[in-house]
Image: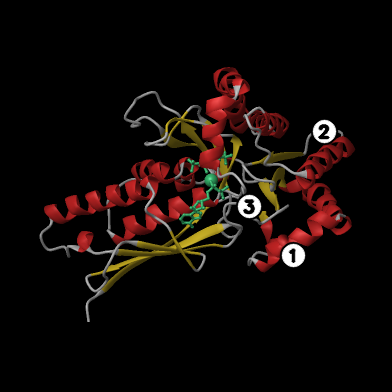
């Protein structure tokens, strides 16, 4: 019986507070702007990926995603696999004792314990896990930064999921992308009171993927030019200051404004893209009501490319923030129905209150 080599890993979701939206190089996945995110706890939302290879396997590399075969012939997944194999070949050439597993077909099996392709960063956790599982399988010596640059080629946001805490993806300026990388702005322990409440308005696959949506925005929106030239640089600076000073009100204002700015460029895309729906807008109003009742900003909403809402708040404000949302869930038909489908995907709503890693 031929040996089966195996490695398993999990990777967390990250939810950007200054959003990546736009590629200047679609092949290398280089962004038009820097971005900044918070990595959520793997105890709540995570991808679990197992990579195996064996001389007994035949055919192409395969990926089984959430129990179904997934097409990995696309250039971006292929770039990740090619780079990881090349690194394994280099390791094998240095040490003749090592088994030549680089030539074996790969079988990758992955599961997200949260909705896939619904605007909850499945591509971020997914590609971070895929790259790390294969790097572990191949026993590669590469640093998280190097692996992050490979994951970036799979999905841009994935480069930030190789790190915990507060993570910036610096856009870089080089054509080869070697200076386009994720760096830790602060560890989670810098601001351990931060919490994220994940509200699932719809677990359905989005109509327009992030990849396609941002290409359409880059190609058609005038507002987008204003965003990448003036808005994002300002938000990056303010956000880094807010995190450094643990200034929640400032963090929250920039988070909400940046989400609004990003969704405005989607609406300014021709034809327009609408990721947020009526339920999303109800969540915006609920956050505003929470802040008005508190007399200060204690909650911040943000939406990725999908209708689902992530609310950042501090631990001490749990009762005011989460309590209000549970009442809303209990009283609003739209939320209630979808909360059920979320629970059936394996995560109870109560468990979706994420801490940071
Ligand atoms: P999301 O908002 O969830 O990140 P995207 O449109 O950016 O949605 O990307 C969704 C795509 O990411 C999926 O269709 C799939 O191709 C890929 N993906 C999601 N999860 C995984 C995973 N665990 N492993 C590999 N690829 C994944
Ligand atoms: C709105 O990283 O999913 O979530 O690089 O094409 O795979 P690709 O796109 P992806 O885009 C994420 C967009 C976003 C904002 C963010 O995560 O920064
Ligand atoms: Co994505």
Residue 75, x across and y down, in percent: 36, 46
Q: Distance between the residues labelled 2 and 1?
A: 32 Å
Q: Quadrant of residue 106?
A: bottom left
Residue 182, x across and y down, in percent: 44, 37
How crowded is the residue under tag 1: few (<14 C-alpha within 10 Å), some, or many (20+)?
Answer: some
Residue 12, x across and y down, in percent: 52, 53
Dot 1 corresponds to which residue? 340
Please tell me whether residue 189 is drawn above or below residue 232 in the rendered image: below
State if disc 2 and disc 3 touch (CB < 8 Å): no
Please tell me whether residue 55 is drawn above or below residue 192 in the rendered image: below
State the quadrant of the N terminus: bottom left
Count all numbered tags in the image, as a single digit: 3
Name the foreground residue: 248 vs 92. Answer: 92
Q: What element carries label 1?
A: helix
Q: Taking 109 as reference, is 17 left or right?
A: right
Dot 2 corresponds to which residue? 296
Q: Taking 223 as reference, is 135 left or right?
A: left
Dot 3 corresponds to which residue? 355
State if disc 3 and disc 1 touch (CB < 8 Å): no
> Which residue is outermost to the bottom?
1
Residue plotted at (50% across, 49% down): 123
Residue 165, x across and y down, in percent: 54, 43
Residue plotted at (48% across, 54% down): 126
Q: What element carries label 3?
A: loop
Q: How far apart are marks 3 and 2 (CA)?
A: 22 Å
Residue plotted at (83% across, 43% down): 286
Q: How far apart are marks 1 and 3 (CA)?
A: 22 Å
The mark that comes first in sequence, 3 or 2, is 2
Name the foreground residue: 34 vs 82. Answer: 82
Please tell me whether residue 29 is drawn above or below residue 308 in the rendered image: above
């Amino acid at each position: 019986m031929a040996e089966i080599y195996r490695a398993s890993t999990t990777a967390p979701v990250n939810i950007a507070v200054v959003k990546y939206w736009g590629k200047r190089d679609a092949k290398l996945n280089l962004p038009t702007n820097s971005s900044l995110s918070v990595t959520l706890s793997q105890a709540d939302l995570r991808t679990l990926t197992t990579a195996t290879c064996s001389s007994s396997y035949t055919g192409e590399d395969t990926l089984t995603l959430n129990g179904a075969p997934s097409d990995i012939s696309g250039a971006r997944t292929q770039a990740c696999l090619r780079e990881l194999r090349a690194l394994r070949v280099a390791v094998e050439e240095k040490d003749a004792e090592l088994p030549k597993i680089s030539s074996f077909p790969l079988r990758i099996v992955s599961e997200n314990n949260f909705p896939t392709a619904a605007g909850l960063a499945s591509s971020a956790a997914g590609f971070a896990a895929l790259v790390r599982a294969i790097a572990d399988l191949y026993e590669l010596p590469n640093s998280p930064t190097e692996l992050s640059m490979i994951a970036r080629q799979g999905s841009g946001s994935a480069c930030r999921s190789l790190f915990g805490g507060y993570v910036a993806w610096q856009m870089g300026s080089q054509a080869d992308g070697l200076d386009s990388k994720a760096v830790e702005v602060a560890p989670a322990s810098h601001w351990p009171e931060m919490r994220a409440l994940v509200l699932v308005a719809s677990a359905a696959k989005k109509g327009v993927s992030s990849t396609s949506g941002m290409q359409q925005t880059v190609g058609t929106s005038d507002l987008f030019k204003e965003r990448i030239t003036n808005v994002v640089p300002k938000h990056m600076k303010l956000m880094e200051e807010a995190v450094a000073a643990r200034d929640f009100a400032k963090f929250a204002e920039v988070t909400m404004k940046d989400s609004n700015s990003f969704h405005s460029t989607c609406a300014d895309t021709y034809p327009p893209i609408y990721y947020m729906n009526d339920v999303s807008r109800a969540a915006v109003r609920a956050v505003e009501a929470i802040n008005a009742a508190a007399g200060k900003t204690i909650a911040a909403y943000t939406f990725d490319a999908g209708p689902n809402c992530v609310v950042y708040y501090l631990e001490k404000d749990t009762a005011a923030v989460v309590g209000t949302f549970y009442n809303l869930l209990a009283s609003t038909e739209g939320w209630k129905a979808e909360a059920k489908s979320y629970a059936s995907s394996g995560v109870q709503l109560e468990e979706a209150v994420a801490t940071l890693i």
